[in-house]
Image (tube, rainbow, N blue to C red):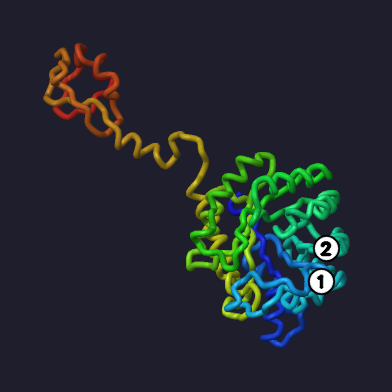
Amino acid sequence: MNKPYLIAEMGVNFYDTARVLGITLLEAAKLYIDKAAEAGIDCAKFQSYKAGTIVSKNSPAYWDTTKEPTKTQYELFLKHDRFGEAEYKELCDYTHSKGMDFTSTPFDYVSADFLEDMVDLYKISSSDISNLPFIRHIGSKGKPVYMSVDASYILEVDEAVRALKEFGCKDIVLFHCVLSYPTKPEDANLRVIQTLEKINPDVRVGFSDHVAPDDTMMTLAAAYMLGAEVIEKHFTLDKTLPGNDHYHAGDPNDFKKAIANFKWIDTVLGNAEKTVLDCEVVPRKEARRSLLLTRDMKAGETIQAYDIMAKRPGTGISPNFTDIVVGRKVNQDLPEDTVMMWEMI
């Protein structure tokens, strides 16, 4: 593996792109898929819901309203719930034609059911981590399940994992995530990735990122170094657009940087075996020490401790054998600074 499995969370960002470019929602969604494929992303992810089944009409906003001014969750979801089964089937087929996996997070039973024949994996939102009947329903479908565990306690995570396993789910990924848009770097708490690995050794662990991209995409690099096997991040074609998720999403160039980082990290981490590398064979000989003569010696003279000194290169008798060399005779005339070889004594 030279990079984690990378998911571009399209979410509903393409709605704003469609408006700005004056194209249809499906055209915009396909444009997002095109750009994700070009960037080297593994999976395109959308969201499937209807405003009336996901939230109360009076449910307040929990995001940064200076970035997204909509005051209630219902109003926000209502803006972005125009797709149904037919549209997701078209996006599924288009995504697969581009060589990527397809998924969409279902937020109701109807969506979970019609997505079954489309998605390569199910993604469960952290908002449903305590919705155990829904988790069991998805777990029973025999597909991999990726689940975000932000804003939850370990007990809640354990209950959700047990619910999936009890209903036959064998391929589970838990996403460390922080339910804050955007997440401040100091709140990212990436070490939780390792905590989830220790507590759940039989499941894989990933990271779903809400930290605003930096120039080096260091947050995702750090997550990978801490063991994230799957990484998900919101995807946009224009981070300056007003709207739900653009302000903390990554654009295609951000994802390309992240992928380059992953490959570099994998290259420099190498493997855990401690041995002499091919590139070290010659330097090892030249940089280590051998026993060298401190004076000219004639054949038949006995070597005393003061006649030898450990110096580079390491191509002769090792200093480890000093006690064996001292007291032996040289069998030929040798000048000062000779690198001692066994055949000389």
- 179 displayed left or right of 138: left
Residue 140 in percent (x, y) is at 85, 49
The secondary structure type at the circle numbered 1 is loop
Q: Nearer the viewer, residue 178 or 302?
A: 178
Q: Secondary structure at mark 2?
A: loop
Q: Quadrant of residue 85?
A: bottom right
Horizontal side, residue 228 vs residue 32: left or right: left
* Along the line of sight, the residue nearer the viewer: 238 or 194: 194
Residue at image position (68%, 81%) is 16
State the residue position of label 2: 108
Task: Farthest residue to the bottom: give it.
Answer: 22
Q: Nearer the viewer, residue 325 or 239?
A: 239
Residues at badges 1 and 2 in contact (C-beta under 8 Å)? Answer: yes
Give, as a three-letter code, the residue at label 1.
Lys
| Residue to which mark 1 is pinned | 50
Q: CA distance from mark 1 to mark 2?
A: 8 Å
Q: Amino acid at mark 2?
A: Asp
Label 2 neighbour load within 10 Å: few <14, some 14-19, many 20+: some
Residue at 26% from the left image edge and 14% from the top image edge? 324
Look at the picture and state if 50 lies above or below 187.
below
Vertical placement of residue 200 versus 51, above or below: above
